[in-house]
Image (cartoon, grey):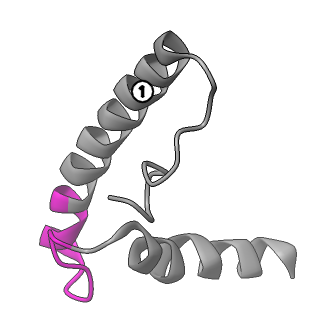
């Protein structure tokens, strides 16, 4: 959690801004966990416990290289 969603350091100075930041990143993390669970049923190289970095390297980076070329 510290590396993937930026919870190691608080992003803002004020408590209410940090509260909103933590709520939004928690919703994103829940959506990510749901999405990875669906993807892991189709693709065997992604497990339901895969971190965000592995997902990006397996799906986002190859698509970006293909579009760039």
43 inside magenta stretch = yes
Q: Which residue is nearer to you in this view: 42 or 18?
A: 18
Mark 1 secondary-structure assignment: helix
Q: Residue at x 46, y 74 (%)?
A: 53
Residue 7: give x, y in percent of width and height: 43, 48
Residue 45: give x, y in percent of width and height: 26, 88
Q: Is residue 7 above or below residue 37?
A: above
Q: Residue at x 19, y 47 (%)?
A: 34
Horizontal arrangement in the rendering, residue 28 relative to residue 43 (left or right) = right
Looking at the image, which residue sits at the far bottom? 45
Q: Residue at x 52, y 81 (%)?
A: 57
Looking at the image, which residue sits at the far right? 69
Horizontal arrangement in the rendering, residue 64 relative to residue 11 (left or right) = right
Q: Residue at x 41, y 73 (%)?
A: 55
Q: Which residue is nearer to you in this view: 41 or 12?
A: 12
Residue bounds of the magenta highlight: 37-49
Residue at numbered disc 1: 24
Disc 1 residue crowd, few under 14, some 14–19, many 20+, Cα 10 Å: few
């Amino acid at each position: 959690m510290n590396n993937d969603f930026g919870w190691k350091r608080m992003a803002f100075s004020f408590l209410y801004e940090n509260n909103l930041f933590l709520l939004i990143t928690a919703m994103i993390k829940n959506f990510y966990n749901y999405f990875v669970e669906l993807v892991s049923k189709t693709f065997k190289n992604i497990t339901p416990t895969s971190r965000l970095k592995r997902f990006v390297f397996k799906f986002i980076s190859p698509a970006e290289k293909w579009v760039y070329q």
